[in-house]
Image: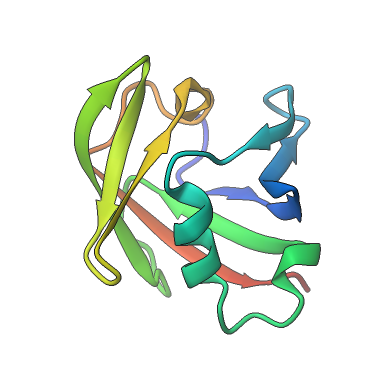
């Protein structure tokens, strides 16, 4: 992993997607439970579907709000779960554009764009 903290700006276009020029990802969709998690994480962010900032790391950082727990591998990606709300979502192989291997925990913070 090149950076300790990674930042993307998801937005809603039929489902939650994001672009990241540094990794070559364009309109990369969140699928299989992740859209519902993002709906929950952004519930208090005005106009989140227009775009918000999602900071994530394999290590805790000040201000993180949620923790994703690695559950199981499937189809080249990994399932992660949250405790509140109790939910599971699948992160596709694009996960490996940010991490050399699937972290046991992913710490995240969702906030409005500045």
Image position of 97 (left or right of 90): right
For the question of whether residue 47 can be seen, the reply is yes
Residue 58, by quadrant, is top left
**How far across and how far down the image is residue 25, in percent?**
71, 27
90 or 5: which is nearer to us? 90
89 or 99: which is nearer to us? 89
For the question of whether residue 5 can be seen, the reply is no
Residue in the picture at 43% in, 59% down: 108
Residue in the picture at 70% in, 43% down: 18
Quadrant in the picture for the C terminus? bottom right
Can you say whether 23 is above or below 64 in the image? above
Image position of 48 (left or right of 65): right
Residue 24, by quadrant, is top right
**How far across and how far down the image is residue 100, in percent?**
38, 21
Quadrant in the picture for the N terminus? top left
Can you say whether 97 is above or below 42 in the image? above
**How far across and how far down the image is residue 61, in percent?**
38, 63
Can you say whether 88 is above or below 27 in the image? below
Image position of 87 (left or right of 51): left
């Amino acid at each position: 992993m090149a950076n300790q903290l990674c930042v993307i700006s998801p937005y809603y276009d039929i489902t939650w997607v994001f672009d990241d020029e540094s990794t070559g990802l364009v309109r990369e969709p969140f699928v299989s439970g992740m859209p519902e998690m993002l709906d929950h994480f952004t519930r208090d962010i005005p106009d989140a579907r227009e775009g918000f900032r999602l900071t994530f790391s394999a290590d805790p950082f000040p201000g993180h709000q949620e923790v994703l727990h690695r559950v199981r591998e499937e189809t080249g990606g990994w399932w992660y779960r949250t405790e509140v709300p109790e939910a599971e979502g699948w992160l596709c192989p694009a996960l490996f554009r940010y991490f050399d291997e699937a972290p046991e925990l992913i710490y995240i913070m969702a906030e409005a764009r500045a």
